[in-house]
Image (cartoon, helix red, strand yellow):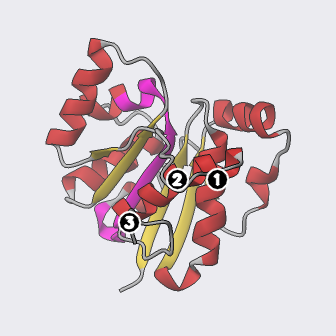
Amino acid sequence: MPNKIVIAITGASGSIYAKLLLDKLLQLKDQWLALDIVMSNNAKEVWKTELGNEEYAQYPVRYFEKHDFMAPFASGSAKYNIMIVIPCSMGTLGRIAAGISDDLVTRAADVVLKERRKLILVVRDTPYNLVHIRNMETVTLAGGVICPATPSFYSRPSTIEEVAATVVDRVLDLSGIDISTYRWKE
């Protein structure tokens, strides 16, 4: 059965990760039935600052406002099976860890966790303080996956996009999406 995916883009630095994830998912349309986006206003500003454009609004997917609790993935009955928060701010991580469903991002994450589906948080801040670490532990114990936006260099990336793609490819692997990518010693 094809995947139903929600992507949440928060205001943390790292818009390139969200952009590359969306670009790759659009190339893999045969692996998903629905691809929806929730993007905070801060995320839009960070995208414009970091990437110098407003292309986030041009992807051929459904967009939902941060406070639209009528979105299908605000309920487990819609059967969205993958949620990726990329990049994930520490504030969003903290609200998810505490079970505070005060917006569509945190409500959808709560739904994914309660339904025992895939929640992947691509945390971007560094360094971590003890509160961050404990929040990551809480989400992990609840069934989520913390995937720090830490690139690998085995493939010898030569551009910033190739470096960022090492993180995005790892996220897609964690999601169960079948991709062609560099594999260690293959």
What amino acid is labelled 1 in the image? Answer: Glu
Residue 71 placement (x, y as % from top left): 49, 58
- The quarter of the image holding the N terminus is bottom left
Q: Nearer the viewer, residue 178 or 97?
A: 178
Image quarter of residue 136? top left
In the rendered structure, which disc, 3 or 2, sits on the residue that comes first in sequence? 2
Q: Secondary structure at mark 2?
A: helix
Callout 2–callout 1 Cβ contact below 8 Å: yes
Q: Secondary structure at mark 3?
A: loop
Q: What is the CA distance from the residue labelled 3 to the residue labelled 1?
A: 18 Å
What amino acid is labelled 2 in the image? Answer: Thr
What amino acid is labelled 3 in the image? Answer: Lys
Closer to viewer: mark 3 or mark 1: 3
Q: Is 145 situated left or right of 90 in this image?
A: left
Q: What is the CA distance from the residue labelled 3 to the residue labelled 2?
A: 15 Å
Q: In the rendering, which numbered label is found on residue 185?
A: 3
Residue 78: within the magenta?
Answer: yes
In the rendered structure, which disc, 3 or 1, sits on the residue that comes first in sequence? 1
Residue corresponding to mark 2: 166
Residue 28 placement (x, y as % from top left): 56, 78
Magenta segment: 76-93
Q: Is 14 situated left or right of 154 in this image?
A: right
Q: Secondary structure at mark 1?
A: helix
